[in-house]
Structure formats: structure tokens, C-alpha cells
Amino acid sequence: MGLRWCLIFGLTLGLFTSWTRSELIKHQQRVQEELNNWWRQEVFYQIYPRSFQDSNGDGIGDLNGITSRLQYFVDTGISAVWLNPIFQSPMADFGYDISDYRAIQPEYGTLADFDQLIATAKALGIKVILDFVPNHSSDKHEWFIKSVAREPGYEDFYIWENGTVTEDGDRVPPNNWLSVFSGSAWEWNEEREQYYLRQFTKGQPDLNYRNPAVLQAMDEILIYWLNRGVAGFRIDAVNYIYEDEELRDEPLSGTTSDLNSPDSLEHIYTRNQPEDYTLVQHWRQLLDNYSANNGGALRIMMLEAYADLKLLMDYYEDPQGVQGAQFPFNFGFITELNENSTAQDFVFNIEKWLIYMPVGHTANWVMGNHDNPRVASRYGAKAVDAMNMLLMTLPGIAITYYGEELGMKDYRDISYDLTVDQPACEAGPDDYKWISRDPERTPMQWNDEKSAGFSSNASTWLPVNPNYQELNLRAQLRATRSHYKVYQSLLKLRKLRVLQEGSFTAKALNRQVFALKRELKGYGTVLTIINVSNRTQQVDVSDFIHLPNRLTLAVVGVSSQHREGERLKPAEINLAPYEGLVITLKVHK
């Protein structure tokens, strides 16, 4: 009898094992698919490290400060952050001039601090993306110092040219190329007696990627940080990396009479060169190979490139289908739209990206960043909730700049004496305000205590916006309604399957109001309606939706007369000036 039961148990165990092995394979496939696609519906939160949290009282944000605030992201619903540059730098352009790609800027901490940040973030389920600056280094980098001295192996690490001498004996640059910050893109070096290319500030010499040693060095740096646990990279200014080998003059654009302005030229020889796309494809392969060989979630690449839409789309993949970045940033909400835009403008801008985006790729939407005025300053404080509703209910990826969840505003009254943004300093006291990027980089407003809870020091690297006493996280947590709570509700809503996978339709209901519809069979509909005007609007959405008798408000703004859970009549939806509403129709998780 015992033998019989052993045989039966053995046969049953064999069948069970066979069944679980099959199921295990399917499970592993699902897990791998999730690991490869984790980023497709992600909300990436941009941290400007210098302004996020100071841990040691020197008035400058740092890595330990970020680590101390990681629970904030868990509470908010954020699971991926990307950090502006944290590498060693003389800070001529606040980290975008790197003097050592493998070291941490001492003001921000140490490599041990970075490793602790990564470990803590991982334990909390937060992925960390690093800002990578490949186009140029600092002129204090040992590579540049060796290149100036013509040390063997470094002679051509940067782009050097003799220039020409005029009949009057004056030395002039080799061509008419201009810096992003105005004036010639060529800088004379007395020691080497040649010009070097610098498309940004004179302290940011352009690297020469036609030299294989440069590419190899950068590949090794990417792998170095991957080995330290980062989830990927945001590649800065990628469309500036290669230039025309023949150094041809760029044609005049005819848009300005100021020949020192970069707008005076059509940048056909200094931006979006064919080799830029090839380089992105090379780094995509590097990241894919690393992910395959080391397991875990796919390491990703997102790009900064201000370019014509058609050129930008080739950074997803080229016409032959060779894969580039996971996504190039979509800056349409920053560069194409503002507080004066109509409903049709918004719908056109949204649809334009989706129409041109290659099939199978993921859209992304950037509402703000460190180089442009904040949402509350660009669209108006009353529009903050509506813009976050728009951002969070569009298909694909959302990118939030720190403080936008609170409705932080630019601090435009920073004096010239306290201004630190280099281009603004160079513009002088009469013009600095309209150039400076300092106003959108002021410290995070955590509470109403000293320095807004950002630092124990009353003196911070940039002054805190004086409105912090009313506009801060603590106050918004305590309030019945707040921008933060609206933002938090939107992140919870994004977990609905209809917002993860649903179809998308946009429609201008009139010149002042537009609507977005997300639908998924069996999982209902989510409708977002936004009034972009300064007048109250009434709209009828009956023809835009199914089941018009089942409209329930899911998210409303801080000043709304409506309430969450309220039922609406589709033919009589009233919106206050700049109001947004998120409505659900028979939604299932």
C-alpha cells in the first residue's frame, strides 16, 4: 500500500512539475516583457540636484538630500527620477561642463553617497536616470588640458582649427558658426595657437567624435555608471555632437539682423548631422547589450534635441528601422504653446507628435524643465491643475519638473548681484532678467520654515521664492484641496488600464475648450476637458462619448465649483476660466 501511494504521488508530482514548468515559462516571459517595457507609461520626475534638498547646511542641494526625500516619491506615486548632472565640474554651466565624468561634484557628495542613493531608491522601487553630457567637456577636464598641450593620444580629442588671417593681418575663425549663447562658436587658445569649437560657453569645448578614442572613452563612462546601478541616461544636446567636416559656412536665416544671434543662421551644418543618429543607434545597442548580459529592467535612453519634428522622429528609429533612443523629448508644450494658445492649437500640437511618431513607439510629453519658465509662469497659476490633468491623461510618458506638482512659480525678482546663470551674467544688468534661467531653478519649497525647508542655512545658492510661506508642500498636504493632491490623484488614476492601454482621441469643442478621450473595451472611458480661456465656458460632449448618462467626476482642480464623484449632464458641462476636469465613464481597473 505504501509503495502504491508513493507511485501515485510520484506520478502526480511529475504532472504537477510539468504543468508548473510550462506556467513558469509563461510567467517568465510576462516578467521579461514588463522589464523591457517598464518605461512606456512612466512618470519621470526631473530633479535639479542643486535645488532639491540640502543635507549639510551649505545652502546647496546634494545627493544625501535627495536620498532623504526618496519617500516623498513613494508617497506621491513616482517610481522614476532623473538627475541633472552630478559629475565633477567647475560649474560654469552648473554641471553641464564636466571635468571628470567618473567623479561626483564635491558640493553634491561622494561616490559612496551616490551608491547609497541608488541602494535606497532600489529598495523603494524607484529607478534613477542620470543626465549624460557627451557633446562637450569642461575646459578644466584633463583631456582638454592634454589636448591643448598636444600630448600623444589627445591631440585630436577636441575640434581644433587654425582659422584664417585677413589682408589686414587679423586672425578670424574658420567659418561663421555661432554659439547657442550668441557670438562665434570658435574660441582662440593662446597656448596651442588654434581655435577650438565650443557651441555653448567658452568653458565647454566640443569633443571630437570622429576620433575613435573619444567614442571609446564615452562608452566606458556609460558602462561605469550602469555598473553602479543606474536605469539609463538622459542624453544632453545630442544633436550638436557632429558637425560638417568641410566646415562650410551656414546660410543666413533672414529672421534677424543681429548677426551674433544663433537665430541668424540656418544650422544645417552644426545640428542633426547624419552621424548624430548613428551615434544614438550605437549607444542604444550598447544599452541593449548591457541589459541582455546583466539582466533586470531594460536600461533606457532619452534624448534632448530641439529640432524640426521630422528630424526629431528619426531619433526613435531611422527610415531603415534601425532603433535609436527609447524616446526624444517632446518639448511642444514648452516651445509651441503658451497662455494665449487656443483649443485648436493644443489639439494640433498633440496630434502632430502622434502622427509623425514611428509605429510601435511611445509618445512623451514634457511640461517644463530647467531651461524654461515654469508652468505656473508660462500658462498662468490658474492653469496649473489643468496642465497636469492634460499631462497625466495623454498616452505614453509624462515628465514632471520638480515643484510643478506644487505649482511653483518663477522668481523673476532675483537681483543681478545674486544671478548665477552664466549667459545672464554676461548679458549685463540691463538685460539679464530676460535671459536668466535662475528663476525656474530656485530651491524646492517643502514648508514655511527657514529657506522653505530646503536648507538649514538662511543663505542658499539661489534665493528661495518669497511665496514659499504660502506655497509649499506642507501647506498643500494640510489643505483640503491643493495642487499637490490633484497631482497625486492623477498619478493614482494613471494606473487604470484604460489610461495605460486605451485608445486616444482629441477634439476641439470650440476655440476655448478641448477634450481628450481614452477608451478601452471592457475597461471604460476617461474624458479630460480643458478650458484654456479666461472666461467661463459651457460645452456639450454628447457626440464625443458613449454612455453620456454616466459621467462621473474623478479629478477636479483646487478652485473648482465641482466635486469629485459628482454626476454631470453631458450637454451642460460648465468650466471656470482655465479649469480642467477629468471624468470617468464606467471605468474598471
Image: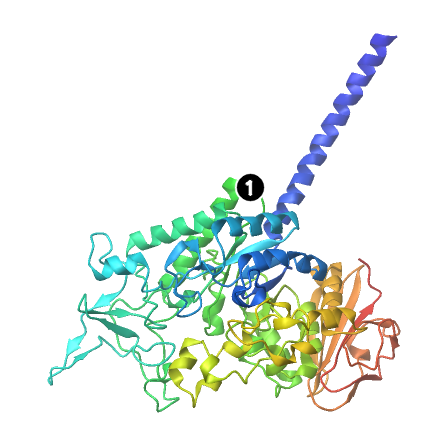
**Residue, x 38% and y 76% (percent of image)?**
180
User: Residue 471: percent from the left, percent from the top?
Assistant: 68, 76
Q: From the viewer's perspective, is 363 left or right of 147?
A: right
User: Is 411 placed above or below 447 here?
Assistant: below
Q: Residues within 10 Å of mark 1 (few under 14, many from 20)?
A: few
Q: Nearer the viewer, residue 445 or 531?
A: 445
Res 558 → quadrant? bottom right
* Residue 18 rendering spot, x and y as whole percentages: 72, 27
Q: Amino acid at mark 1?
A: Gly
Residue placed at 58% from the left, 65% from the top? 52
Return the residue nearer the eye: 219 or 471.
471
Q: Quadrant of the N terminus?
A: top right
Task: Please indicate whether residue 291 sits to the left or right of residue 1 in the image.
Answer: left
Residue 508 is left or right of residue 170, and the answer is: right
**Residue 465 vertical placement versus 8 (above, below):** below
Residue 117 coordinates in the image, percent (x, y): 57, 52
Q: Quadrant of the C terminus?
A: bottom right
* Tag 1 secondary structure: loop
Residue hosting label 1: 295
Residue at the (19%, 58%) spot, across then down: 150
| Residue 167 vertical position relative to residue 162 in the rendered view, above or below | below
Total number of numbered discs in the rendering: 1
Residue at 33% across, 84% down = 260
Lateral position of residue 238 relative to residue 539, left or right: left
Question: In this rendering, does residue 404 appear at all?
Answer: no
Residue 554, visible in the rendered structure: yes
Q: Position of residue 107 (x, y in %)?
A: 47, 61
Based on the displayed image, in which of its 4 quarters is residue 192 positioned? bottom left
For the rendered model, the colour scheme is rainbow
